[in-house]
Image (spheres, rainbow, N blue to C red):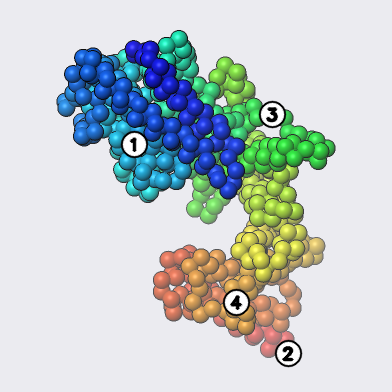
Amino acid sequence: MAAHQSTEWRTVCEKFRLAQELSEIESRKDPENNPFRSKYKARDLLKEIHCSLVKIHIEEEEEGEDDNEADGGSMQIAEGEPGNECGKTCTGDSPAGLRAARLAVLQYYLGVNHIETEELSAGEQHLMNCMKLIDKCTTTRENVSLFIQARNQLGILWAGRDEIEKAQGFLEIAESMYLLYMKEDGQPPLDLQDYFVSEGEELSQQEKIRSRFEMAYTHTLYYLAQVYKNLEQYERSGQYCHSTLQRQLEYKQFVPLEWAINAATLSQYYITKTRYMEARHCLAAASVIATLAGEIPSEAAAKESDAECEKREELLQKRAEIARCWIKYCLNLMQDAKKLLEDNIGELDLDRQEELKRARQNEEEEKEKGRKSAILFGSSDTFDSICSLEEKISSMLPLDFEEARSIFLVGQSYVAQAKEYFAMDGHVTDHIEILQDHSALFKVLAFFEQDLERRCKMHKRRVDLLEPICKDLNAQYYLLICRQLQFELAESYYEMMDLKLAVADKQDQPDVHTIKKFNNLCSSSMKYYQMFLDSIRSPEGKFPEKLEDEVLRPALVAKFRVARLQSKLISNNLATQLENLNHSLESYSFIVQYCEENPEAKKAVETELELSNEMVSLLPLKINRIRSNMASCN
């Protein structure tokens, strides 16, 4: 663009530079009681520049530089697609187009200034004025960056007002403009700051211009990802998040820890879609990029410096959060494999296992090659490290114990890492959630183990993890967590009881030690199920007549299992047998009666209700036989 040699133009350029400095640098030093002091000063300068610029443009027109008017105040926003020439009054690179663009840049910065000082309506008005000025011109390298950034700002503004579809419209046009410009031209466009450069000053370097332009488009994609998420278009949102992260790495426009957490968060979306290769890649990239934030300061260094203390806290926390995402990856990968491999009673289906192994041999390798090319993160500095970390864990569903164990061990290592930061002291809820995930890893690994005694030991590890916490936790403050732990401990003991029962069935006659162990497992399971059920009672100790939805199934399942456990207790004493069976019948009858009184509950416990009805019919016969035996003995 032509450089203005007048003193007035040099003054305009100097004021613009000062306004930028006030907004971007000095504003960080503003006092808390006057947080927008520098922003207001910058605004005054921008208004002065606008007045000067209008005067300069009038003088130019009077000198006959161009007959076209440049204020554009009455122009409307073009409704057509980007690049549509219909309704355009001048080209973007003409004198009139450049004059319109200079005024539009001022309106843009005034709009951003008002938004940053929380004056949103005024900010919107200035941004719309910016749009009116530039929408009269064709899109060229002189104005394309301004086109995109103005629409980005309006997109953000409307998204903040929960007008998501309006935001979507602005942002999608910005995206289309970028794609069309890159297809038809592709040269680094004029930077917004280069509209105000006096004679003798250099324009921004091409590399810097390209970087800012690409950053603007990266922002477009980032905001679109949020918009699509709010519109519940999760697949599309995931794609835009991924593209945003890729571009941030490509153009080195990222803060390591922030980028790493965003990548780890994206991995959790891919997990919900069972796209484990993409999830693993995101997590590996997150772990590698997080290291770019530097070494974790030592405890000694943290004690000596507040800055080091803050850095240590942030690094430990973010890396622990990434570790937790890795735990979820390992756990879900194993659980999804379990769903594929289990039969109708929840045991490993060996025929299905062999069938899946045969089908997987060549198919997955080809599939991975095709998909991986589209999703890779990293630069030459980090690519090898990311790939190396990926190789340490599979992204394919494990089909046997050895494959499951290798994933389990990776998950367990991240459990240890996460617990270093999320310790019980200070992070009670997070610490317990990590322990619950660790327990779940043991539970799903036990599914793949065919040796019953070893499976039993895995469930015992679950008990060892959770029981001490459950005993120490105050139910008054952590009621929901206590219920979860009670139910899981009851379930763990229940699994162990079933496994011991299966082992005993293989023996001719279980010995006294085996019987004692079996009864202890039954009693422990009943104890925790009963604790769970008691937690539902009112302060007066009354069990609710109608169960809340969130406890309906767990409570009825707990009753069902207590009934089964009571009937499984082994005793040579007929009176004890009779007592146990009567308790069992009471529990089964409770389930039947509750479902009769609350028919909507039947769907929640269809299998348990069916078996309870059977037991309510059968148990009285067994009870009567024992009574007859007792009478004959007497």
User: Do the numbered discs 4 and 3 sit on residues whose CB atoms are within 8 Å?
Assistant: no
Which-is-in-front pick, marks 2 and 4?
Answer: 4
- SS assignment at label 2: loop
Answer above or below: position of 557 versus 629: above
Pick the quarter of the image with the C terminus: bottom right
* Residue 594 image offset from top left, x and y in percent: 48, 77
User: Do the numbered discs 2 and 1 sit on residues whose CB atoms are within 8 Å?
Assistant: no
Mark 1 belongs to which amino acid? Leu
Q: Is residue 284 visible?
A: no
Answer above or below: position of 338 versus 195: below
Mark 2 belongs to which amino acid? Asn
Q: Which mark is drawn over residue 294?
A: 3
Task: Please name whichever residue, 175 or 262, is drawn nearer the observer in this view of the structure.
Answer: 175
C-alpha separation, residue under disc 4 versus residue under disc 3: 52 Å
| Nearer-N-terminus badge (1/4) | 1
Pick the quarter of the image with the N terminus: top left
Answer above or below: position of 299 versus 176: below
Mark 4 belongs to which amino acid? Arg
* Residue 489 image offset from top left, x and y in percent: 67, 60
